[in-house]
Amino acid sequence: MKAIEINGKEIANRLLKQQQKVVQRLKNDGIIPKLVVITFSDDEASQVYIKQKAKKAKQIGIDFECHRLNHSVSQEDFKRCVKKYDNDPSTSGIIIQFPIPQQYDLKEVSTWISPDKDVDGLNPMSMGWLLTDQAHFLPCTPKGILYLMDAYNIDVVGKDIVIIGNSHIVGLPLAIILTHQDATVTLCHRLTANLSAKCQQADIIISAAGSVNLIGSNDVKSGVIIFDVGMNRLADGSLVGDVDYAKVINKAAKITPVPGGVGPMTVAMLMDQTIMATCYQHGIDYQQVIECR
Ligand code: NAD
């Protein structure tokens, strides 16, 4: 059996065309969505992510601003910068591009973007709403995976799902959301014992570890569905996920490739949530606006 490839790139491109129409409709009413990214990053991966966000925003018609901060900036000045955009009515959504330098208090930083502009869903209030199944904005990667599940008719009710990686941007929120959807979730991490045995029992595996070849064909059962979130740059410059794709594809039922799987969906969801934020801030019914898609 050869797995069906879950084509995130194609679905994201389809969404992009719909988002273009929605943004045009908002612009016809004089409303221009704007996304601001605040970054310290000089690392290559973050630069690539920011470029992708800028490119997609431009294609859709969303205004995009990237504000770079220097590592020497104090915590107070960092906060002042975030708050400047948070208080600016022309800014619809803000994200802080992780990683940020260690000297800043991450827990405090995540409270600075107010919930109505928190398009990455990382404010503790947004996280609290997520816990009680009332979230407006979800973290973008989990939301992208949910969208792909829907697009490929993947039912999670009663399924055994192993998530590898418990970060607050991917694994942890996803575990909460899928638990709300009546899946049985096992959330694993670096110190989890017998990871392979757990994966072998899983109907669905979502790997967000950032570890090359973490999952091989002996670690999965036949017919498993795999979402590979990991993005690992090899010495030859190529990008691979956490899963040994070439081998696992012969055993899985459905699988996301890297690149072209989850990654494009993360960016597409960020654009969606920026449009959503714009609608909320202007008292527009988001559902009504997207019906023109
Ligand atoms: P993180 O470093 O915050 O968390 C990594 C998690 O994986 C931790 O829970 C850690 O314990 C676990 N882990 C690491 N190695 C492991 C191993 N060998 N066995 C079991 N668990 C292991 O990372 P993150 O920000 O959540 O990102 C994880 C990966 O996903 C990275 O490769 C990142 O580039 C990628 N990512 C991709 C997207 C996308 O849109 N495709 C979005 C976010 C992150």
Image (tube, rainbow, N blue to C red):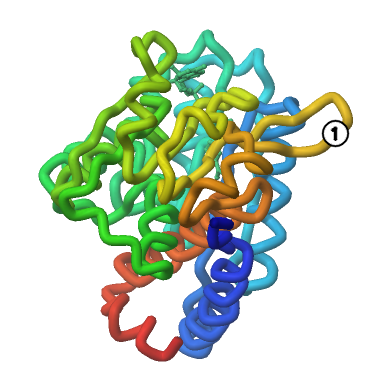
- Residue drawn at point x = 85 percent, y = 34 percent: 237
Q: Is residue 36 visible?
A: no
- Which quadrant of the figure has residue 35? bottom right
> In the figure, is residue 14 to the left or right of 132?
right
Q: Position of residue 32 (x, y in %)?
A: 52, 73
Q: Position of residue 224 (x, y in %)?
A: 41, 47
Where the C terminus falls, by quadrant?
bottom left
Please name the residue that numbered disc 1 is placed on. Answer: 237
> In the figure, is residue 101 to the left or right of 59?
left
Towards the viewer: 192 or 166: 192
Q: Position of residue 14 (x, y in %)?
A: 57, 77
Secondary structure beneath label 1: loop
Towards the viewer: 80 or 23: 23
Q: Position of residue 245 (x, y in %)?
A: 63, 42
Q: Residue furthest left?
A: 132
> In the figure, is residue 89 to the left or right of 10?
left
Q: Is residue 144 above or below residue 113?
A: below
Amino acid, disc 1: Gly
